[in-house]
Amino acid sequence: MKLSREEVLHIARLARLGLDEAEVDKFREQLSELLESFAVLQRVDTTGITPTAHSIALENVVRSDQVAASLPPDQILANAPQKEGDFFRVRPVLGDR
């Protein structure tokens, strides 16, 4: 599929690219070759092949959730640079405090 000069300019406009005449010719050739490569895929017989999202079966490998006791606050805050009560003290992100 050969692209026209106007089609390349339209694609460039959609991509917000400014092209000079040499670039228009260069991209017309390159994009046309790319589209011809994809045209080969359209000729492949895919009857009887089920559509898939992945070429191999995927399986999540995760453990099931298990309820466990939490660490005590004093142990969690042991290495905190600053703490306030049972919380981490951090600099304010919005506004002053």
Image (tube, rainbow, N blue to C red):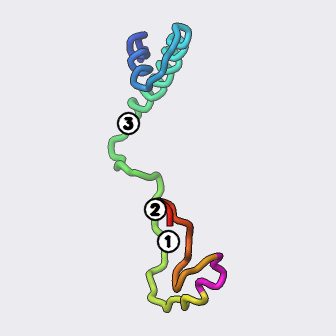
Q: Nearer the viewer, residue 87 or 23?
A: 87
55 in relation to 61, above or below: above
Q: Main secondary structure of the magenta part?
A: loop
In the image, residue 62 above or below residue 92: below
- In percent of width and height, residue 95 lies at 47, 60
Instruction: Give the quarter of the figure containing the N terminus.
Output: top left
Question: Is the residue marked by circle 3 packed among few (<14), some (14-19), or many (20+) residues within 10 Å?
Answer: few
Report if residue 45 lies within the magenta region: no
Residue 50, image x and y in percent? 34, 50
Between the residue at mark 1 and the residue at mark 2, the CA separation in whole angstroms equals 9 Å
Residue type, label 2: Leu
Which disc is residue 58 wearing? 2
79 falls in the magenta region: yes
Q: Earlier in the sequence, mark 3 or mark 2?
A: 3
Residue extent of the magenta highlight: 76-81
Between label 3 and label 2, give the one nearer the viewer.
Answer: 2
Residue located beneath label 3 in the image: 45
